Image (cartoon, helix red, strand yellow):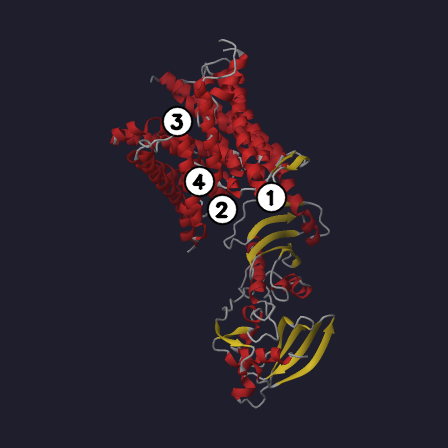
Amino acid sequence: MNNKKIIHITLFLAIIASLSGGLLSFVNSLTAPIINENAIAAEKVTLKLLFPNTDEFAPVTGFEDETGAILSIFEAKGAGLAYKVSRMGYANPIVMMVGISNDGKIVGFEVLELADTPGYGMKVGEAPFKNSIIGKSTTDGLDLISGSTISSMAAINAINAARAHFNNFKGIDDDGSGSVVTPPVPELGRTILFSSDEATSVTTVVTNEVVNGDEKTFTVESNGYSVLEGGYADAKPNVFNVTINTVTKVIVKVEVVEMNDTKGIGDKVEHEVFLSQFVGLELEDENSSVDIISGVTRTSISVIRAVMTTRGK
Amino acid sequence: MSLFKNLSNGMIKENPVFALYLGLCSVLAVSNTINNALGMSVAVIIVLTVSNVIIAAMRKVIPYEIRIPVYIVVIATLVKIVEMLMQAYTPELFTALGVFIPLIVVNCIILGRAEAYASKNTVGASFIDGIGMGLGYTVGIFLLAAIRQLLATGGLNLINPFNQFVFFDITIIPSEFTIPLFAQPAGAFITFAVLAALLEVYKQSGTKPAKKGA
Amino acid sequence: MELFSLFISAIFINNIILNRFLGMCPFMGVSRKTSSALGMGGAVTFVIFFSSIITFGLYTYVLDPFNLRYMDLITFILIIASFVQLVEMIIKKFSPSLYKSLGIFLPLITTNCAVLFVALENIKQGFNFTETVVYALAVPIGFTLVLIIFSSIRERLDIADVPQALKGNPVAMIVAAIMALAFSGLAGLV
């Protein structure tokens, strides 16, 4: 191939390449705004909930996120950033949107998708949790929901992913006080039948009853480890709320009101892995059973006894 | 070739899908609903026809040694433009077709026709060839999609991709008799095999409908 | 562990040929003899692996930062085409017999949907470098695996008594259907 040919070829390629590059750039300038609009339109409703006073939103493209929790980021012009985040809850992914204002405060929190255990994981979508999130800064600690550890931790980790990006973006130093320590999932141990002696030899006191249609919630004091074995001078029983359906005799839910057993051990019963076992069990059925938490026998049994107290009431 | 013969050639005897086995990737993957199949076909026809025209127009100035890269650049530019337009104006169809829109670039039909036909024929003839082959592709993928959707879900529907207006949505086979296998890869392969075999039978039977002599 | 499940699922569960329908042309054309199937698989692995790394680098360090994301398609395909050209020259030099048996299908690797697919998917899934490498290795391994299985079946099919209409490609499709069914049984693996 002689030089003239090589020049001819190179020139041709260069022309073709620039023509196509130019054409693509032109079409891109036409279509990119429309594509952006489409992206925002889908989320517009939620964005307005987070930033009611802002009209202009723009998607943020190409963000860095090591956690994988951030699905998309939108800029609320002049107001802050909105993050659509998702993490696996107890059973299903939880999708949320967090709004962080330009001065580093969480101004909005909306749950978009949540399909979790009613009374436990579903609490992530309820007002108390939401109110505990809004107003916090990007470095404050966030509180878990007791009894909904897995789901609320998922939500908090998602929110933290958003906050981490925000801090990174704005150059705010995070001293790690907002990060959530992962409490381990308690290991379930042996099974106790509702009909067994352990479950029914009761030392409990019912201190309150609330009727709500077919459901009744009993507040029960049940002796746990500190009373029965700890021998502490000021040992107090644990207090639980047991809600049952008085017509079907099915357990609706169990909540921990006061935990007076050993901190770090007894409070493991607050974990939804343990408490959710009760949901849906038939109170009168001899074969109903739950698994106690290994190493937390007395406290686990105190919960079971509290539940059994509601039999026949 | 006469106009009609050129067109019909692309649609039956040299049907790019069932006779030449080109562009199979998209045919099998996008044939789950007739909506997707038609959307894809339109994109392919546009890219095929326009690229044929451009390449035919430039055929005398493209240096032989770099013809393949040049064809690729032309086709890739066209595909990207179509992709951007679809993302902006028909977002639901864009999401449904997904990665198969950019994969039109490597659809053997388009590059094949550029090399085999458009580089050697006039703009007009190349245009017709593009339409013919494109229609052949459409017939192939539509047939496959209609069968698969009918057998797998019991019904057919068509939606305007620009405004999501539903043209029709009919259920023919009650849901107890549907065969979900056809929504899966295995079903796609089987349906394709049967249609290909049928075309083979037709080609060998020698009882083609009377055509005008060449 | 996530890398491991990415690796396994790319080979068996979302197999590029049997589940995603990509890489069909060589599947139908080259799979008549096991030796050429192996050679093809090797060539494709080489192309996918290196072109994925290059396109990943180009996108991450050039296209994305400079807001030129819309140039991805055209640059990727040109990189792939150049690479295939390179592979062609290498094979021609070191194994002329393989070059001859692969024939037209060697340059056709450029238009192999699987190659462009992996390059695009790495970006779309937001993989980092390690994940890109794992994926770019796993996908062509799955491709080669199916190609080899298929070619051994086809070697037998060629001497079997197949009905005229089904002879050649249609019956190959049916074999593919059965293989797809078999592989879909692995869905619960990871």
On the image, numbered disc 3 is attached to which residue?
C164
Q: Is residue C177 above or below residue A208?
A: above
Disc 2 residue type (three-letter): Gly
Contact? badges 2 and 4 (CB < 8 Å): no
Q: Are marks 1 and 4 on the same chain?
A: no
The answer to which of A230 and A301 lies nearer the viewer is A301
Q: Is residue A107 above or below residue B72?
A: below
Residue B189 at x, y = what percent?
46, 36
Question: Counting other residues with Cα less than 10 Å from the Cα at mark 4, is it few (<14), some (14-19), or many (20 or more)?
Answer: many
* In-image side of A13 versus C159 (left or right): right
Disc 2 or 4, which lies upstream in sequence? 4
Disc 1 residue type (three-letter): Ser
Q: Secondary structure at mark 1?
A: helix
Residue A63 at x, y = what percent?
54, 48
Q: Are marks 3 and 4 on the same chain?
A: yes
Report the chain holding disc 1. B
Q: Secondary structure at mark 3?
A: helix
* In-image side of B169 versus A154 (left or right): right
Report the chain holding disc 2. C
Contact? badges 1 and 4 (CB < 8 Å): no
CA separation in Å, label 3 and label 2 = 48 Å
On the image, numbered disc 1 is attached to which residue?
B175
Contact? badges 2 and 1 (CB < 8 Å): no
| Residue that appears at 41% across and 38% down | C176
Q: Is residue A275 above or below residue C129?
A: below
- The image quarter containing residue A199 is bottom right
Contact? badges 3 and 2 (CB < 8 Å): no
CA separation in Å, label 1 and label 4 = 37 Å
Q: Is residue C68 visible?
A: no
CA separation in Å, label 3 and label 4 = 37 Å
- The disc label shown at residue C126, or none: 2
Q: Is residue A100 visible?
A: yes
